[in-house]
Image (cartoon, grey):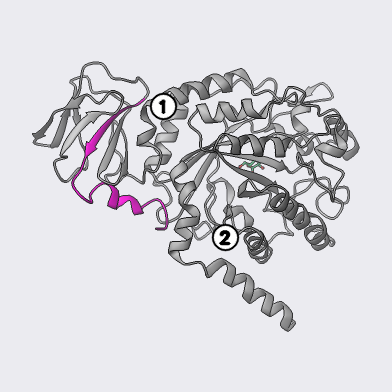
Amino acid sequence: MPLSHLVLLAVMMQAQSAESPAARDARMAWWRDARFGMFIHWGAYAVAAGTYKGERIPGIGEWIMSRAHVPIPDYEEFVHRFNPVRFDPDAWVRIAKDAGMKYIVITSKHHDGFAIFDSKISRYDIVDATPYKRDALKALAQAAHRAGMRFGVYYSIMDWHHPDAQGPNAPEYNSSTWSNANFGRYVENYMKPQIKELLTQYPEIDVLWFDGEWIADWNDERGRDLYAFVRGIRPTLIVNNRVGHTRQGLSGLNQAGQIGLGDFGTPEQQVPPEGLPGVDWETCMTMNDTWGYKSYDDDWKDTRTLLRTLIDVASKGGNFLLNVGPTAEGVIPTPIVSRLHEMGDWMKANGEAIYGTTVSPYGRPAWGRYTAKRGKVYAHVFDWPKDGRLALTGLPDRPLAASLLADGTPLTIERADSGFVVQLPRVPPSTIASVVVLQVGGGSGGSAGSGGSIR
Ligand code: GLC
């Protein structure tokens, strides 16, 4: 390796390791407190909406180009028809904010290679290649900031459109073994310049969420370079672990059971049974069975499942990035809006037990979950005991006080053979999860909070 490369490598490795724990905590602070965000998958696949040449294509909607072997010129037709005339960025942000979400991460460019931002180095973008001609990403970023929400972008390393990546010269779009001899050119002349555009044209971006890193031409060396590159442009940036090549399947972990590169792990469509102790992580999940819009996918999870998943994630020290797939016209489908609205109702009354909380210090009780904050433990009761007696499983000491979070009703605590028991009213405040606030002495609640993250 030439000396210049060695020097570069040393600088790159320093960028990943030089940050002090305190500086890292400061950079991650808003993200750790947020706990709940909106993922948005939106692009030309929403035009196809799961159907190609009259045939319903199985699988996730944003993969239709690969699943149906759509030739590039045919797929470009979807792009030419992408005209989200009903896109209202403030309305999208309002839906997210009312649900209690604190940040939004949207696909700036998915595997299909089409960019929904104004890219100067590519004409395969929303401004140059669609009748819409406007920069939707900019509009959404600005709307998010107006509403006090954080903003991030997803960017696919794999690219089914670019000739130097997995485009016209590849035998198939998605391959983990085929290699493009010109891939380095794609990285230096296209991908990094596009990412630089994102980080210079959009000051709102706080999170870079990479994906499509399993291709043969990607590796951890490239990942380290990319990580140093993006943090070099914006030092406060938070980057997911798919910047590296190490992820095995949907767990978001590498073979050693670690998140590998980047700042946080990305379990997909699953909540790790024990969380991911010692590291930051975020579970991303669909509300039906697709990320990108499919007109006929009605397999919606109910509000109870979604909320309990959020609580489960928070109790294990993670974030929950819940996906929305808007239509090609720019509308978030009604089943999504109604569920998010119901989640928002619960969050308005109980958000204190989610935001800024840390991993449960007392394991997982049979009736629900615990979250914690300094001096407080929140008992999220899924199954309201018929006899009105809530056994505080795992609590070593008698809490100083107990009350219902929803309305402040004080509750009595008794000592029983099995430990401590809170006497509950007959009717639960919520059929999904009722929160009992336990005041705990000094350190016991919050101090255990180091669990979910590196702190
Ligand atoms: C997968 C899919 C992709 C989706 C992503 C979300 O990696 O390839 O379509 O965007 O998961 O986590």
* Residue at (56, 23) in percent of width and height: 300
Q: Is residue 283 magenta?
A: no
Point out residue 203 in the picture as x, y percentages from the top left corner.
66, 48
Ligand 1 is found in the corner quadrant, namely top right
Name the kind of residue labelled 2 in the image. Leu
Which residue in the protein does label 1 denote?
348
Q: For this rendering, which residue is in front, 74 or 22?
A: 22
* Earlier residue among tags 2 and 1: 2
**Separation of disc 2 and disc 1 at Cα?**
35 Å
Circle 1 sits in a helix, a strand or a loop, which is it?
Answer: helix
Task: Let me know if residue 241 appears in the view.
Answer: yes
Point out residue 330 in the picture as x, y percentages from the top left corner.
71, 25
Please, which residue is most extreme toward the right here? 73
**Which quarter shows the N terminus?**
bottom right
Name the kind of residue labelled 1 in the image. Lys
**Which residues are the magenta region?**
433-455
* Residue at (71, 26) in percent of width and height: 87
